[in-house]
């Protein structure tokens, strides 16, 4: 299962690198890339004007049909706004919110996320 992500400060990128699964980083200056395979989107928490590149990517060609779920990073100090970007995308595109982690994730987050990815991959292969 491919992971698709974008990173503003590098926290999300660091998490993805620790996960070590095939990944594609959305180019914020040109998010229009067709993936042609199932994927999970991993997004940081920022204002909508910064995260709209995720919408641009999702809505490009067949990417919306390939999207299996979303995971979000954030800071627990945000309170109710913790991982709100991922929650908003899950609601907007009617996809599951699969996982959340703080900052660039702990070793437990990495292992637990890998399990979630494996479960989604198994369901997708059926």
Image: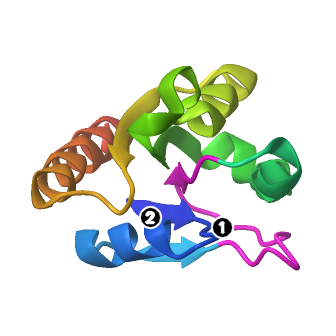
Q: Secondary structure at mark 1?
A: loop
Is residue 6 shown above or below 56? Answer: below
The location of residue 47, given as percent across then percent down, is 78, 45
The location of residue 93, given as percent across then percent down, is 71, 28
Is residue 37 shown above or below 14? Answer: above
Query: In the visual, does 70 lie left or right of 54?
Result: left
Q: What residue sits 66% from the left and 67% below the top?
A: 35
For the residues labelled 1 and 2, the Cα–Cα distance comes to 9 Å
Q: Is residue 67 visible?
A: yes
Query: In the visual, does 89 lie left or right of 97?
Result: right
The location of residue 38, given as percent across then percent down, is 51, 53
Q: What residue sits 87% from the left and 79% below the top?
A: 29
Residue carrying label 1: 35
Magenta span main SS: loop
Q: What residue sits 37% from the left and 59% below the top?
A: 1
Question: Which residues lie in the magenta part?
Answer: 26-45
Residue carrying label 2: 2
Is residue 52 shown above or below 29? Answer: above
Q: Secondary structure at mark 2?
A: strand
The location of residue 113, given as percent across then percent down, is 24, 49
Q: Quadrant of the C terminus?
A: top left
In magenta stretch: residue 33? yes
């Amino acid at each position: 299962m491919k992971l698709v992500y974008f990173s503003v400060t590098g926290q999300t990128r660091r998490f993805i690198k620790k996960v070590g699964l095939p990944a594609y980083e959305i180019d914020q200056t040109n998010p229009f890339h067709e993936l042609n395979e199932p994927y999970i989107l991993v997004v940081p928490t920022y204002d909508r004007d910064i995260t709209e590149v995720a919408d641009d990517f999702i809505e490009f060609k067949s990417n919306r049909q390939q999207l299996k779920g979303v995971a979000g990073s954030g800071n627990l100090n945000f309170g109710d706004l913790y991982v709100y970007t991922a929650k908003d995308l899950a609601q907007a595109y009617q996809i599951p919110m699969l996982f959340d982690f703080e900052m660039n994730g702990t070793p437990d987050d990495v292992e637990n996320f890998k399990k979630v990815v494996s479960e989604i991959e198994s369901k997708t292969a059926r």
